[in-house]
Image (cartoon, coloured by chain):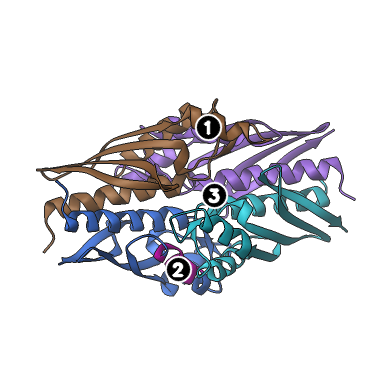
Chain colours: A cyan, B purple, C brown, D blue
């Protein structure tokens, strides 16, 4: 009833939702961006079937956000990061990424390969 | 390259990961369980393609947790709730649920129907 | 070394930080705002010494945010809500509120009374 | 109406509540514990008046939790970490720590010094 590629895509979605809603709202500045990227990637890589996570907090976007603000940090949101993941489930490899579209972060399936 | 059923399963996973990691850790007691269930369901139903979410915080499990504790509330975790969701993506309906297995919350695809 | 009013203020801060970082990022729309307000208030009222929490999600701000967006929901942030709390610790009553200042949510002690 | 030591204690509480509710629920394993400790400390140090944060994820507690489980990771909770913070507000220094008491994480004021 459920195929391996479908299960692989479900697993990929779980990881993306987890990463986003665990870490959105975290205070972030240029100085703390690197440690946050690493912790996000390593924590989500703990989840089953999650082979690789890359989080890239966008320094230019972060600086632009801070330039409009009286504060020297902001809260992490989808507009401040690119994320890519690779999920392996049985013989299926799923690649996903997050990018901004119409002002909110869109999580996308890039490829599903058996 | 990516089929509608695969996309539907990806969307279903996103909602499950979002719900879990947004709300895990929320202080919960028997008196506040009903309002939390409702807010969880209604907030995640806002997400695209998410037609229905049911959250059932398990009163018996909650009472058992509190009986072992000096506090009159605890933090929401997977062992304290059942969740079911229905995702509609194009012509595909995906049903999912969460249940405990081997001591941690397992999110499962129940069915994928075109 | 630590006075009751100081402890009361510490407790008040814990509740504010908890409320904000537990719920920031939650998907919210005009239709789901009421259930989220109630769940936020009731969950934080579970915490020790927390007598009263009022969360007011600002419909006008929410509508204005959505008017600029292709989506029909957004993520909860400090700019979309007013929060007031009353903490009772021993014989001390602390009142606090959150309001926007210079573009980020400022949590403030309103009064500390013995 | 509100003294500097009271405000300092309020700020200290905010940081503790923020840290706990932002990061509780994060997937953690022995291999990812160090990056999570660092990201937690650096992110909360961004907040105003927060001079120093130390997070120590307890490897022995983590190993013990995993020994009882079929999984090779768990979710971060208060029982798995010690946290210490130093807050500076005007001329006041507040030291705080978190430790387990009666089965749930208790955040404590250690000292308030002018």
Q: Distance between the residues labelled 1 and 3?
A: 23 Å
Residue annotated with mark 3:
B21
User: Residue at 27% across / 56% down in the picture?
Assistant: D102
Say which element carries label 1: helix
Q: Is residue D38 one of those drawn in magenta?
A: yes
The front one of A43 and D93 is: D93
D62 with respect to A42 (left or right): left
Q: Distance between the residues labelled 2 and 1?
A: 31 Å
* Image mark for residue A8: none
A56 with respect to D55 (left or right): right
Chain letter for mark 1, please: C
D27 up-or-down from C74: above or below: below
C97 with respect to B102 (left or right): left
Whether residue D92 is visible: yes
D72 up-or-down from A110: above or below: below
Chain letter for mark 3, please: B
Chain letter for mark 2, please: D
Residue annotated with mark 1:
C62
Residue annotated with mark 2:
D42
The front one of C91 and C84 is: C84
Give the percent coordinates (x, y) of residue A45: 64, 65
Quadrant including the C terminus of chain D: bottom left
Q: Is residue D37 one of those drawn in magenta?
A: yes
Give the percent coordinates (x, y) of residue D33: 50, 71
Give the percent coordinates (x, y) of residue C43: 38, 39
The front one of B52 and D72 is: B52
Q: How far apart are marks 3 and 2 (CA)?
A: 21 Å
Q: Do the residues labelled 2 and 1 touch (CB within 8 Å)?
A: no
B70 up-or-down from D98: above or below: above
User: What residue span does the magenta drawing correspond to?
Assistant: D36-45
Q: How many marks?
A: 3
Give the percent coordinates (x, y) of residue A88: 76, 62
């Amino acid at each position: 009833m459920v195929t391996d590629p479908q299960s692989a895509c479900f697993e990929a979605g779980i990881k993306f939702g987890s990463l986003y809603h665990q870490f959105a709202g975290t205070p972030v500045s240029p100085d703390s961006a690197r440690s946050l990227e690493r912790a996000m990637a390593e924590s989500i890589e703990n989840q089953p079937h999650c082979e690789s996570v890359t989080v890239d907090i966008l320094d230019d976007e972060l600086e632009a956000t801070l330039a409009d603000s009286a504060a020297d940090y902001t809260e992490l949101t989808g507009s401040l990061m690119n994320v890519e993941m690779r999920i392996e489930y049985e013989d299926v490899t799923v690649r996903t990424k997050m990018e901004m579209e119409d002002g909110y972060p869109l999580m996308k399936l890039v490829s599903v390969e058996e």
